[in-house]
Image: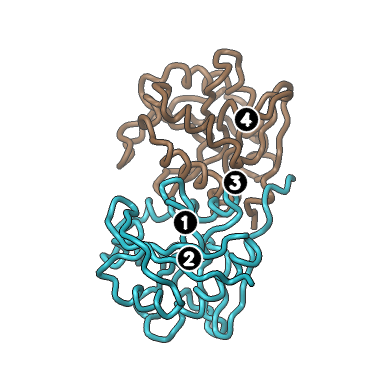
Chain colours: A brown, B cyan
């Protein structure tokens, strides 16, 4: 079983994806208190952000996969949360990305591709979706740049209608 | 792989094992949080919320270096409840808490588990003389706090509900 002390670290050209820790509370809480949350369920208090951070870590133990804090290579300050995600009421396994510092530089795509490669190569996934709130055009661009293709919307019982983007299965030739 | 925190310790008492919360506890925990019995510990809550609570308990250990153990019967493996140190930002200070499921009450399990958790916290976590938040109507928990040697300190608020704050004696010499 994967526990919180065995979360792998991934490295990309510009980024590190590492286990979340207590040092990430301040930047994460700041992001969750900002208007940037308008497409991900709205603002959260500092206490809610703290609990969310605990959940992100515990998810690794519950599911054997999870989300990483993303940092630049020369600075350990978290700039985003990217990775593999499946709360109880998710229709299937998801890859998701939040980038709150340095947006517009392709970090979400770069981190997302690393997370997806981990899912396919290390975990044996054959598919993954990304669920995106209608109107979140920046996230749609990331999904499309990763080769994901839109499918019919999913009406989530708590979050309402969400766009589904399905990522390509590396074992199948591109259509 | 990186080592981000020590694994959650396992404590054995005479009849009980205190161990890490884990995914297989979810059905029992969900059944508990669906009942009104959970109203002083963050419930009632549905299955999705309970999944998040369980994940959060595990992550609490990674963030704080302490947290709650799930209590298991050593002989039967039965999941009986939980005990440990909760310390979210909304708490005044680290709190020793305990909850038993209804079928596990009345056999001294909470006392046995709380003693072990409190001693461990004092010796290994540097958390001596913690508080316990107890609702004024929770006569069982009030009696247990007294039996543990804790004393009433003041009125307080936890999870937006009024409660009493009890203070445990120091364990470390």
A148 over B30 or under it: above or below? above
Tag 4 subunit: A
In front of the other: A59 or A168: A59
Other-residue count near label 1 (Cα within 10 Å), few / some / many at <14 / 14–19 / ≥20:
many
Disc 4: CA contacts within 10 A as few (<14), some (14-19) or many (>=20): many
Query: Which numbered disc, 4 or 3, marks the residue that appears first in the sequence?
Result: 3
* Quarter occupied by the N terminus of chain A: bottom right
Q: Are marks 1 and 2 in contact (CB under 8 Å)?
A: yes
Q: Which residue lies under the disc numbered 3?
A: A65
The residue singled out by tag 2 in the image is: B25
Task: Describe the element under mark 1 as helix, strand or loop.
Answer: helix
Q: Percent from the top left, x then y, of residue A100?
A: 52, 23
For the residues bearing labels 4 and 2, Cβ distance under 8 angstroms: no
**Disc 1 from disc 2: Cα separation:** 8 Å
Q: For mark 2, give the secondary structure.
A: helix
Measured as percent of width and height from the top left, residue B114 is found at 50, 73
- Which chain does the numbered disc 2 sit on? B
Viewport quadrant of the C terminus of chain A = top right
Residue plotted at (57% across, 76% down): B17
> Real-space Cα distance between discs 1 and 4?
24 Å
The residue lying at 64 percent from left, 67 percent from top is B123
Is disc 2 surrounded by few (<14), some (14 to 19) or many (20+) residues within 10 Å? some
Q: Earlier in the sequence, mark 1 or mark 2?
A: 2
What is the C-alpha distance between the residues marked 3 and 2? 18 Å
Q: Nearer the viewer, mark 3 or mark 2?
A: 2
């Amino acid at each position: 079983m994967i526990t919180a002390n065995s979360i792998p670290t991934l490295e990309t050209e510009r980024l590190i994806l590492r286990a979340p820790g207590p040092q990430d509370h301040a930047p994460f809480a700041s992001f969750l208190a900002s208007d940037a949350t308008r497409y991900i369920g709205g603002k959260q208090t500092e206490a809610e952000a703290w609990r969310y951070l605990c959940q992100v870590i515990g998810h690794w133990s519950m599911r054997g996969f999870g989300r990483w804090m993303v940092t630049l290579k020369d600075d350990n300050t978290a700039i985003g949360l990217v990775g593999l995600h499946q709360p109880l009421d998710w229709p299937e396994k998801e890859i998701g990305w939040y980038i709150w510092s340095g947006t517009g530089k392709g970090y979400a795509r770069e981190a997302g591709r690393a997370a997806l490669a981990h899912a396919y190569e290390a975990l044996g996934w054959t598919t993954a979706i990304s669920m995106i709130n209608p109107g979140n055009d920046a996230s749609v661009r990331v999904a499309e740049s990763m080769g994901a293709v839109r499918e019919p919307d999913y009406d989530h019982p708590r979050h309402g209608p969400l766009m589904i983007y399905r990522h390509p299965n590396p074992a199948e030739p591109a259509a | 792989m990186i080592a981000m925190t020590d694994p959650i310790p396992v404590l054995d008492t005479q009849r009980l094992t205190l161990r890490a919360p884990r995914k297989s506890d979810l059905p029992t925990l969900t059944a508990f949080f669906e009942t009104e019995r959970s109203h002083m510990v963050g419930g009632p809550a549905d299955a999705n919320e309970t999944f998040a609570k369980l994940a959060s308990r595990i992550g609490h250990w990674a963030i704080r270096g302490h947290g709650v153990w799930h209590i298991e019967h050593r002989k039967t493996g039965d999941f009986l409840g939980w005990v440990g140190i909760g310390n979210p930002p909304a708490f005044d200070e680290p709190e020793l808490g305990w909850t038993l499921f209804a079928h596990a009450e009345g056999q001294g399990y909470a006392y046995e588990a709380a003693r072990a958790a409190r001693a461990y916290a004092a010796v290994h976590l540097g958390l001596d003389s913690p508080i316990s938040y107890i609702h004024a109507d929770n006569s069982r928990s009030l009696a247990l706090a007294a039996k543990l040697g804790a004393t009433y300190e003041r009125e307080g608020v936890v999870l937006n509900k009024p409660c009493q704050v009890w203070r445990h004696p120091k364990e470390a010499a």
